[in-house]
Amino acid sequence: MRASILLGSAVFALMLASAGGAAAQDDAAAAGAPNNGGHAAAAPDDQGGYFAHWFDRVREAQAGQPHWITPVATVTPRLEQEFRFDAGFQQAGNGAHLDNYGMGKGLELIPTTSNEIILNLPPYETRSVKKAAKGWGDDPVLLVKQRLVSANEDKGDYIVTAFLGVQAPTGSEPFTNHAWVITPTLAAGKGWGPFDVQATLGAALPLSHESEIGKSVIGNVAFQYHLAGVFWPEFEINATHWTDGPRGGKTQLFLTPGVIFGRFPIAGRTNLILGVAYQFAVSPRLVTTPVLTPVYDRQLLLTTRVTF
């Protein structure tokens, strides 16, 4: 895991250095601007190999998909290249407060015209009032996206993508579930002018301690509207249904209104995106035994991203 962090940081530094000299616009630096029409990037061996043409592939990949923005909570089906840092401030129904710095986000890269890999950093968590503790959470170390079909705004404005996520049990004792977890997911989206819907449906499958954690089905839907170039108000529905374990049969449902601001140009391809959302539970009725459900009552979410 630490090796992945170091590798990701090195690649990120390389990408930003290259981006500073790139003249091409960011994917959707202006959402209404024409894309490159899907013209093929130069062959990898034309001018110095694979890394010399990295941004050619990124431009090609993003030209052939919708130019929406990534929601605050829902993982987008789009391929994105950015560094992301989120923070969440939770209030649980039993009175506990939990602050989560990083939220398991990290470095997102587009290595081919149809794939994305995400190297996530472990979150740092602090809990107070109830069972006070601080330390690192489990690391959702890797997420791989495979885009299946897509079309930009000129050709239908839709996308379907498959994900596979892996979480490692690397957290401090108060915050680890002691199990590797894999999360296969199918994501899709459709746009109609300035309005779009992005959705995911997946399953969290622990590879051990299943009776303590439980398998779950996770669904998210985000409704967005694009205003005045840089405003993206949104409303998300985030649901988790546990099929077994201590929460077996229960469905946790959150509603998440929010707004995202961006993309603000920094230099070359590099842009800044900021967002805020407020998440609150609407079901099930609060219970504290055998385990606290819903997991928390409400949460303030902040997101910062630098795309390149």
Image: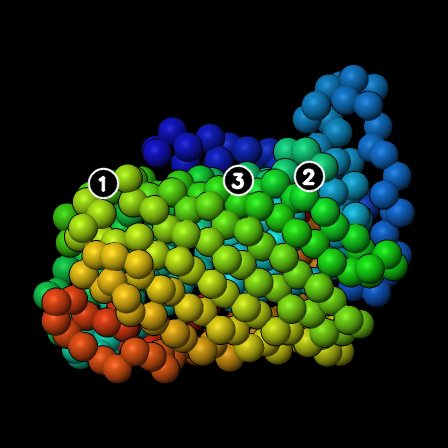
- Residue 300: image x %, image y %? 39, 75
Does label 1 or label 3 sit earlier along the sequence? 3
Q: Amino acid at mark 3?
A: Val
Estimate the spatial distance between the alpha carbons at disc 1 and disc 3, rounded to whole Å: 22 Å
| Residue bearing the label numbered 2 | 114
Residue 16 visible in the shown view: no
Which residue in the protein does label 1 denote? 208
Asked whether, in this view, residue 296 is left or right of residue 102, the answer is: left
Residue at image position (85%, 34%) is 40
Q: In the rendered image, which residue does mark 3 sit on?
A: 144
- Res 141 quadrant in image: top left
Secondary element at image label 2: loop
Give the crowd class for mark 1: few <14, some 14-19, many >=20 residues within 10 Å: some
Q: Which mark is residue 162?
A: none
- Say which element carries label 3: strand
x and y percent of residue 301 in the render?
43, 70
**Residue 243, image x, y percentages:** 30, 58
On screen, 57 above or below 226? above
Q: Earlier in the sequence, mark 1 or mark 2?
A: 2
Q: Taking 136 as reference, is 119 left or right?
A: right
Would you say the residues marked 1 and 2 are in contact, meaning their CB atoms lie under 8 Å apart?
Answer: no
Residue at 50 percent of width and 50 percent of height:
185
Q: Residue at x 38, y 42 (%)?
A: 182
